[in-house]
C-alpha cells in the first residue's frame, strides 16, 4: 500500500528563489552605482585634462605671439622659449573649459610652462542603493606642460637672424621677408604630464 502524504514539502523552494532573486537585484543595483561613480569619475578626469590643456595651449599661443612680435630681436628668443616673459596667466581658460564639461576647476600656474588643475564635477553620483552617494561629487587632477621645440645659436652679426631648428625642420629667417614663420605648434608642444 502506497501512502500519500497530505502535507508535502512542495513550495519550500519559493522562499529560497525569492531570496536569491532579491540578492541578485541588489547586486545589480550595486554594480549600477559603481558604474555611475566610474562614469562620473571619468567625467571629472576629462574635465581636468581638457582644462589643463586649454590653459597651457592658451599660454603657448601667447608665447608664440610674443616670439613673432620680437622675431627681429634674437636676444629675447631664449626668454620667450623659457616662458620668462610677461604673458598673462591662462587659468581663466581652464575655468572656462571645465564649465563646458559640467565641472568647476581650481587652476594654478606651476612655473611659467606648466598648469595644474583640480576639477570637480557639478553633477553628483546620484541616488543609488549605496548610501551617501547622492551628494558625492568626483574630483580629478591634471597637469599640462609646455615644452619648447626649438633651438638656435645666436649669430652675433647685426641684421642676421639665427637659424631656428624646431623638431626636424630648420627655419632660415630673412628679416626682409617674414611671411613664412613657424606657428605655435612648431615652436612649442603641449601635453599632459604623467
Image (spheres, rainbow, N blue to C red):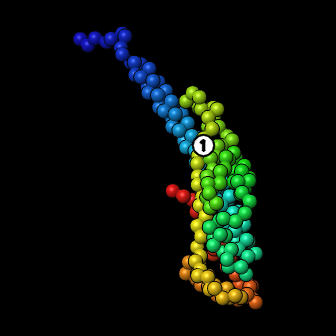
Query: From what the image shows, is residue 4 above or below residue 41?
Result: above
Rendered location of residue 77, percent (x, y) = 66, 74
Residue 41 visible in the snapshot: yes
Element marked by disc 1 = strand
Q: How crowded is the residue under tag 1: few (<14 C-alpha within 10 Å), some, or many (20+)?
A: many
Query: From what the image shows, is residue 40 above or below residue 54?
Result: above
Quadrant that contains the N terminus: top left
Residue shown at the point (68%, 59%) measured from the top left: 54
Rendered location of residue 178, percent (x, y) = 74, 85
Does residue 79 appear to the left or right of 23 in the view shown? right
Query: From what the image shows, is residue 191 above or below residue 31?
Result: below
Residue shown at the point (64%, 46%) measured from the top left: 119
Residue shown at the point (69%, 63%) measured from the top left: 59
- Tell me the quarter of the picture where residue 184 sits: bottom right
Dot 1 corresponds to which residue?
A: 139
- Tell me the quarter of the picture where residue 86 sits: bottom right
Rendered location of residue 177, percent (x, y) = 75, 89
Amino acid at each position: 500500500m502506497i501512502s500519500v502524504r497530505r502535507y508535502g514539502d512542495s513550495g519550500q523552494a519559493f522562499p529560497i528563489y525569492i531570496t536569491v532573486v532579491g540578492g541578485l537585484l541588489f547586486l545589480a543595483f550595486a554594480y549600477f552605482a559603481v558604474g555611475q561613480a566610474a562614469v562620473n569619475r571619468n567625467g571629472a578626469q576629462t574635465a581636468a585634462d581638457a582644462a589643463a590643456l586649454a590653459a597651457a595651449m592658451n599660454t603657448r599661443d601667447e608665447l608664440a605671439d610674443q616670439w613673432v612680435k620680437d622675431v627681429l630681436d634674437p636676444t629675447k628668443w631664449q626668454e620667450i622659449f623659457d616662458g620668462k616673459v610677461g604673458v598673462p596667466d591662462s587659468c581663466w581658460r581652464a575655468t572656462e573649459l571645465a564649465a563646458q564639461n559640467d565641472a568647476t576647476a581650481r587652476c594654478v600656474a606651476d612655473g611659467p610652462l606648466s598648469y595644474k588643475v583640480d576639477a570637480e564635477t557639478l553633477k553628483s553620483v546620484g541616488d543609488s542603493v549605496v548610501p551617501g552617494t547622492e551628494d558625492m561629487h568626483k574630483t580629478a587632477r591634471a597637469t599640462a606642460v609646455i615644452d619648447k621645440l626649438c633651438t638656435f645659436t645666436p649669430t652675433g652679426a647685426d641684421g642676421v637672424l639665427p637659424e631656428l631648428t624646431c623638431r626636424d625642420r630648420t627655419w632660415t629667417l630673412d628679416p626682409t621677408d617674414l611671411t613664412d614663420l613657424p606657428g605655435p605648434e612648431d615652436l612649442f608642444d603641449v601635453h599632459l604630464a604623467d
